[in-house]
Amino acid sequence: MTFSTQQKPANQPKSSNAGKVWLVGAGPGNPDLLTVKALRVIQQADLILFDNLVSEDIRTIFPKSVPAFYVGKRKDDHSIPQKELNSLLVKKARQGLNVVRIKGGDPFVFGRGGEELLTLIEAGIDAEVIPGITSASGCTSAAGIPLTHRGLAQGCTFVTAHGETELNLDWRALAQIGHTLVFYMGVSRAHVIKQNLCMHGLSGSTPVAIIENGCRKNQRDIIGNLGELDALVESQNVQSPALIVVGDVVSLAGKLKAMPELEELAQNCA
Ligand code: SAH
């Protein structure tokens, strides 16, 4: 495989001694969903810093010779505070290393990639973002749910169910906009999502999907309706990471999810 010569390889010697930081999106979990560019910079890194949303399957493709450290943030377990992480990125780049800072999904979608990039730019560090497939897109595709569909949804809205301090959402707008709504970090807020959307006019019979471990071997799709959203999270013991999708497009899941017998047929033909 060849690459454009206009693209500077990650480990090409630079005029100054400073290295570079790559903010890389790992996508939702399946290594096949990494971009070619992400794979290339991973293979040429001097140091890899990864989050908890970077799946095990992706971690196995990190070169064994490259030091890789977990710097993620699970709920109630911040292995390294964001400020210290920002300083670490600056320090390692100043030491001349090519640092791959890899995050689940896309670094600019609820991933604090903007904050890290700002710090790097302010410190005069060469930095570049490599987008990844955000989980709303990857997980819904894997569940057979189109984010938009003629006659069902003319748009989609990505929402975080966790605010820095309190959740400050315009629930009326969300309930009435007619979009597919995708809630990130929503599992522990399922009752809030249900209550507010219903209170502002969305019917309890609106289809919902909870997609757990999307695009991984253990993906689980739980389909139901808005009125039972919190009950489903509890009865099915939904674990993070999981997305909540609300909207009529969810009704297509049964028809569009790849059928195992067809997948088998495709594999036999390959
Ligand atoms: N930057 C990431 C989002 C980080 S916020 C992205 O673009 O996807 C973390 C939330 O993303 C999780 O709480 C969950 O709601 C969602 N998420 C990330 N990966 C997921 C996966 N493989 N399956 C389901 N949800 C996922």
Image: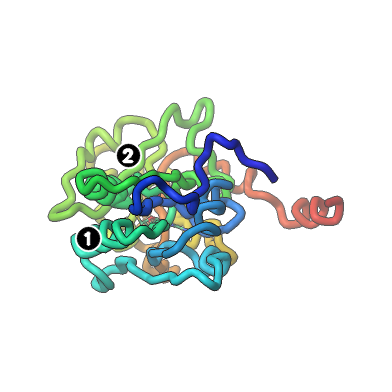
Q: Report x, y in % for residue 184.
A: 35, 52
* Horizontal side, residue 56 vs residue 47: left or right: right
Note whether residue 238 is visible: yes
Q: Distance between the residues labelled 2 and 1?
A: 45 Å
Looking at the picture, tell me which residue is in the foreground, 248 or 166: 166
Q: In this view, does 47 lie above or below 178?
A: below
- Within the image, what quadrant is residue 128 found in? top left
Q: Please give the residue where the numbered disc 1 appears in the rendered image.
A: 87
Mark nearer the viewer, 2 or 1: 1
Which amino acid, mark 1?
A: Ser
- Within the image, what quadrant is residue 170 found in? top left
Which amino acid, mark 2?
A: Leu
Question: Does label 2 or label 1 sit earlier along the sequence?
Answer: 1
Q: Which colour scheme is used?
A: rainbow
Q: Which residue is drawn at 45% across and 31% down?
A: 153
Q: Please give the residue where the numbered disc 2 appears in the rendered image.
A: 202
* Horizontal side, residue 260 vs residue 139: left or right: right
Q: Is residue 111 above or below residue 8?
A: below
Q: Residues within 10 Å of mark 2 (few under 14, many from 20)?
A: many
Q: Residue at x 18, y 50 (%)?
A: 167
Q: Report x, y in % for residue 157.
A: 36, 37
User: How many marks do you count on the picture?
Assistant: 2
Judged from this view, the residue extending furthest toward the left is 165
* Horizontal side, residue 215 vs residue 174: left or right: right
Note whether residue 218 is visible: no
Helix, strand or loop at disc 1? helix
Helix, strand or loop at disc 2? loop
Q: Residue at x 80, y 51 (%)?
A: 266
Q: How crowded is mark 1: few (under 14 residues within 10 Å), some or many (20 or more)?
A: some
Q: Report x, y in % for residue 101.
A: 38, 57
